[in-house]
Image (tube, rainbow, N blue to C red):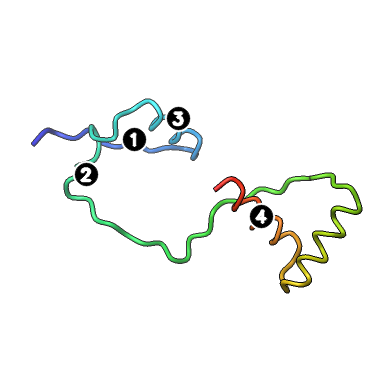
Amino acid sequence: MKKLKPIPTFKTEAEEREFWESEDSTDYVDWSTAQRVRFPNLKPSTTAISLRLPVGLLEQIKIAANKRDVPYQSLIKIWLAEKVG
């Protein structure tokens, strides 16, 4: 079994992301002993955006959302996820 390198301490997520983009994780982690875990309460990071839509389009989206009994922003997210997924 090879000796693993210690994982450094990171000040920010960006610093950690940059590190792992250039390093091979097998030098730091013995993946043969890894176990699957679940994070049922973990929510993905989100960011607010500003999006200009024609008034008519927004009204159509709001009507569609109302028919489905969901907020229109949620319906937009669902549709976007379906389209890119």
Q: Distance between the residues labelled 1 and 2?
A: 18 Å
Q: Distance between the residues labelled 2 and 4?
A: 36 Å
Q: From the viewer's perspective, is the residue at label 3 or at label 2 nearer?
A: 2
Where disc 3 sits, the SS reads helix
**Mark 1 lies on residue:** 8
Q: Position of residue 69 (x, y in %)?
A: 73, 74
Where disc 4 sits, the SS reads helix
Q: From the viewer's perspective, is the residue at label 1 or at label 4 nearer?
A: 4
**Mark 3 lies on residue:** 18
| Residue pictured at 36% horizontal, 62% vertical | 38
Amino acid type at mark 4: Trp
Q: From the viewer's perspective, is the residue at label 4 or at label 3 nearer?
A: 4
**Mark 4 lies on residue:** 79
Q: Image height check: is 26 above or below 33? A: above
Where disc 1 sits, the SS reads loop
Q: Is residue 38 left or right of residue 3?
A: right
> Who comes first in sequence, dot 1 or dot 2?
1
Question: In this view, which residue lies farthest toward the top?
Answer: 22
